[in-house]
Amino acid sequence: MANRQVQISSLPEGRLEPSNFELVSTPTPEPGDGEVLCRTLAVTIGAGQRAGLQGSASYAGAPESGRVMGGSGIARVEASNHPDYTAGDVVRAPTGWQDYSVHPAADVSAVDADADTGHLLGPLGTNGLTAYFGLTDVGQVAEGDTVVVSAAAGSVGHLVGQIAKAAGASVVGVVGSDQKRALLTDELGFDAAVNRRDDGFRAAFKAATPDRINVYFDNTGGPILESALFRMAVGGRIVCCGAVSQYDTASPSGGPRGVPGLLVNNRVRMEGFLVFDYADRYEQARAQMAAWIADGRLKPRVTTFDGLESAPQAFVELLAGTTVGTTVVNVA
Amino acid sequence: MANRQVQISSLPEGRLEPSNFELVSTPTPEPGDGEVLCRTLAVTIGAGQRAGLQGSASYAGAPESGRVMGGSGIARVEASNHPDYTAGDVVRAPTGWQDYSVHPAADVSAVDADADTGHLLGPLGTNGLTAYFGLTDVGQVAEGDTVVVSAAAGSVGHLVGQIAKAAGASVVGVVGSDQKRALLTDELGFDAAVNRRDDGFRAAFKAATPDRINVYFDNTGGPILESALFRMAVGGRIVCCGAVSQYDTASPSGGPRGVPGLLVNNRVRMEGFLVFDYADRYEQARAQMAAWIADGRLKPRVTTFDGLESAPQAFVELLAGTTVGTTVVNVA
């Protein structure tokens, strides 16, 4: 039985291209003692994975060419050597971009086999947990706050805005197209949205934050982070989640002006986090998100691609900003 | 009775010069109802006051020429229209750079008339409170931490290092001269100190922080902040207290590289604060500092200048980095 894998064939120099990957056929692995063999049903792609291809070690470790591309997925158990799982179970697993993978049972977790894959990989997956803990724990969002989020139509951003609304905050999204802007305000309940590519961006950003910003959820770094720094309220919090403006390039820009001067003047806290540090509270967060989906307060958006072979193109489009919501590749 | 004042005559363009001030003789003010007339005994100068002369509004408000230079002092009450004070009392007061000043009684506070002026304006004054709350509250210093402080021989820095030692941390100071480096390690108990002007600064800084940095207390901003960012431990805290590298110049540099990327990867918190927000806990902190002075754990250093007319020169020397510890101008 062949196992198709999307392997990293070269590290990108400048923008990522589909040619940085290759589709390879390898033997399907055999599960050892205590392991399960998984058939990938779908994987999700996040912009942060681009950071892992920058050649320097990030939190995900240094990349190597010839390695299967990593990623979170939903899979069906094909064979199990562990009593907790039997063939046919549906699980969340770090499948990577391939048809089959083998994992110690402790590395997978059962999910409802009837649940929507886009929900499992979006609000109930890493993206949703990142939005939830970043906004509530790091950002300490409170009723009446003004929350601004960048990459606001993206996998994390579109959930941040909706969670902030559920928390009673006023929400402004920063996006890269007028189409996304309309999506946020017309369909997802954002109070306002501004297009960072508009000539009048700075003035529009200021006009959209008349009471300044209590929580800025930063997915981009770069110029938008700098704009937000200059609009922070006294005691404001900047949640550093990602820096997509810096990923898909060979020459990241300098740091934002205003650090540290504006942090001092306005007593602003700026804090980075990784969602994995909150693993012991995932189930609590998932229960909350599921309740919000059920009562209509959280409307997950998914952009789907079909077929494992489409994963590199999906990643390129995600980085180019042409996808909205959670990017999901259906594999089987 | 004449009241000599050092007034701001012009805002500095580039480096501050004594000619930005002028000594003016004005009438001594009369205390109104509920007010006290104070005779300034000594004032302290802090680098942060330079930020208030940058022409843009800082937390201290926008400056104006023709206004007496502000500052904290120790004064003797000359006349009082408030029952809490009588002539001869010694008080802490926002005297500014002048012989006489009038204040509502609520704006002054009694101090021990026999206490050392350098102690009152150093560890028991704004500098000491800034070091104390910045390190303990914002920095959350803990036993076994590695603490790094910049401008480490300065008014706040030399106290930060000693408070960190009292808290059981290992302390590295960053300074601008070999003389200051020796002061820190030979006399003030720092574990190590590095000279930022040395060619091998980056390597020496790395060598001095083999376990990385848990708390970086930033008084400088600029290149030292950037160096520290690259050495932060997972979960580290950056206490943003001041940005002296950015004050005495017409063209502040860009922000530090590594923001926000390194904050995310290492889950680092970076937080600005102003000591005034801790006013309700000043007395508790002063009691702790006084105990540390008494038991020898805290050795305050003071650089003194004599005469109100020397204040502009003292300020210039402070900004040039030729003073150590708290800078005090004895006025009477």
Image: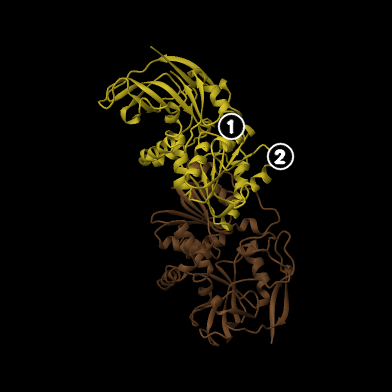
Chain colours: A yellow, B brown
Residue A60 in the image, given as x and y percentages of width and height: 46, 34
For label 2, the residue is A199
Camera-side residue: B318 or B262?
A: B262
User: Is residue A158 placed above or below B62 in the rendered structure?
Assistant: above
Question: Residue furthest toward the left?
Answer: A83
For label 1, the residue is A248
Q: Can residue A198 be seen by looking at this rendering?
A: yes
**For the C terminus of chain A, which image quadrant?**
top left
Left or right position of A22 against A290: right
Residue A305 in the image, given as x and y percentages of width and height: 51, 22
Q: Residues within 10 Å of mark 1 (few under 14, many from 20)?
A: many
Camera-side residue: A308 or A289?
A: A289
The three-letter code of the residue at mark 1 reads: Asp
The three-letter code of the residue at mark 2 reads: Asp
Q: Can residue B183 be seen by looking at this rendering?
A: no
Q: Nearer the viewer, mark 2 or mark 1?
A: 2
User: Is residue A8 placed above or below A259 in the rendered structure?
Assistant: above
Circle 2 sits in a helix, a strand or a loop, which is it?
A: loop
Disc 1: host chain: A
Cα distance, mark 2 to mark 1?
23 Å
